[in-house]
Image: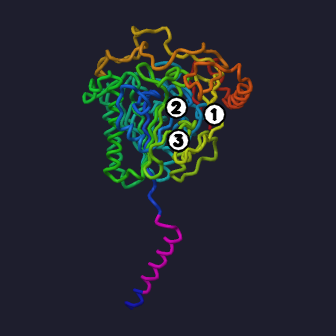
Amino acid sequence: MIRVQRTFFSFVCLIVFCQQALLGAEPKSKPNFIVIFADDLGYGDLECYGHPRFKTPNLNQMAAEGARLTQFNVPVPYCAPSRATLLTGRYPWRHGVWFNPAPDGGRFRSGVGIAKSELLLSELLKENGYATICVGKWHLGHDPQFYPTRHGFDDYLGILYSNDMRPVNLFQGEKVVEYPVIQANLTKRYTNRALKFIRKNQKQPFFLYLPHAMPHKPLAASEAFYKKSGVGLYGDVIAELDWSVGEIFKTLKELNLDENTFVIFTSDNGPWYGGHTAGLSGMKSTSWEGGLRVPMIARWPGKIPPQQVIDTVCGSIDIFPTILKQANIKLPTDRLIDGKDLFPVLTEKADSPHTALYSMKGNALFTIRSGPWKLHVKQSLRRALKTQSKDWIDPRGPDGVTIIAPYEQAMPNQFPGLVSGDQPASMMLFNLKDDPAEQHNVAKQNPQVVARLKKMYDEMHAQVPNQIRNFNKQPQKKFLRQKK
């Protein structure tokens, strides 16, 4: 009987061995994903992107250990649409959030946000066994039906919109847990919650979406960083963001998760006053490169080769399909996904997967980018608040209670990008390889390029729903788009 048992046991072991040999090896655990999304961080706000005074040692190290992208674009130069695009892989005129929901005024005060019909990265990952959390700014709707916890996130901590919109209250899950918010503690508080999530879920695959509040105005840094950088409040804020990134990597290494975690750091759009565009034109809310081009660093030891500087044209629209591909999750087939898998770019420096990238402002397309060429179909000023000065009073400025530095905020005289160059007009063409600062309109010298780009623009613009294109002609009423 004993001999029979031993023979049977040996037979079972042989079958298991053969299965492993046929499969190559036991399947590896699913990778973890972390997306760190700064708010209004300019292309030149980091030391590794050329800032002359700000120090960002942890982000410098992240770039040295992975890939630093220099032609990474967002589709809209302001907050909410950029966030929805990252989480859906779709342009704003498809996912429907082409505006900034705001609880304190405007046509988007309430009843607007991400449609239930949209599929977010969080939802697809959760359906496939991932623990998910959003820590920070949501801005895809602040009414209950739009809460992060109703769109694929197991938990949430943060402010549901921009930190200069009133009321500034902190949500835990679906309940307010602090009002007024001590904004100086936000970066630290968000970081600590993110670390707690990583520790709790170290034995299972997880998705951490960390959309920080900073450096969106009003700027605020904790006591540990306030007045420590030596280069002003903005520098203090950047230093604390850098610290946060360092704490995340420290925890990943401590828990032996480092080599199984794909981390992306980027921004939702260009900088506000006090920021830096590294010599690009414009700023946040403009369709110049200073508003649309943002830093992007990707790190995954053993997967993404270190010390890469990648000039390939791509964008935040590509994060959705890139993460899903690495999670071995198929893209939805019932809707158009505009993003492309970036992994060949990150691992092999492949050519751009896009024929063209488009940007939107308000309810219309503004620019098209194809290779080195960028066509400004519609005119955009190079600066916001053009007539304002250092005496400007921000109607959404700090109230002296929710932050610790109410009189040190950046002002319009601290312009982040270039304002020089040819006078803004419609149908301006720039060769960004030769003229990255968009100083010289070369449309007259390149009529064929203009015609080619305008044709592609028209084809894409035809896909913008009439409900959006005609929005400014409609009476002011609630607007909620639920179309796929």
Q: Quadrant of residue 241?
A: top left
Residue drawn at (33%, 30%) of the image = 239
Relative to 303, say whether 50 is above or below. above
Residue 128 point in image, percent of width and height: 49, 53
N-term mark: 3 or 2: 2
Q: Identify which amino acid the numbered label 3 is placed on.
A: Ile
Q: Is residue 224 magenta?
A: no
- Picture residue at 49% right of the left edge, 70% below the top: 20
Q: Name the element at disc 2.
A: helix
Residue 257 vertical placement versus 158 (above, below): below
The quarter of the picture where the N terminus appears is: bottom left
Secondary structure at badge 3 equals helix
Label at residue 319: 3
Which residue is the site of mark 2?
A: 82
User: Which is more N-terminal, label 2 or label 1?
Assistant: 2
Q: Are marks 3 and 2 in contact (CB under 8 Å)?
A: no
Amino acid type of the residue tagged 2 in the rendering:
Ser
The answer to whether residue 345 is visible is yes
Q: Main secondary structure of the magenta part?
A: helix
Q: Which residues are magenta?
A: 7-26
Which sits in the foreground, 280 or 201?
Answer: 280
Q: To which residue does mark 1 refer?
A: 371
Q: Looking at the image, is mark 3 or mark 2 nearer the viewer?
A: 3
Picture quarter containing residue 314?
top right
Q: Label 1 vs label 3: CA separation? A: 20 Å
In front: 118, or 212?
A: 212
Q: Amino acid at mark 1?
A: Gly
Which is nearer the eye, 107 or 462? 462
Q: Is residue 24 above or below residue 127?
A: below
Q: Sort mark 3 into few (<14), some (14-19) or many (20+) by Cα contacts within 10 Å.
A: many
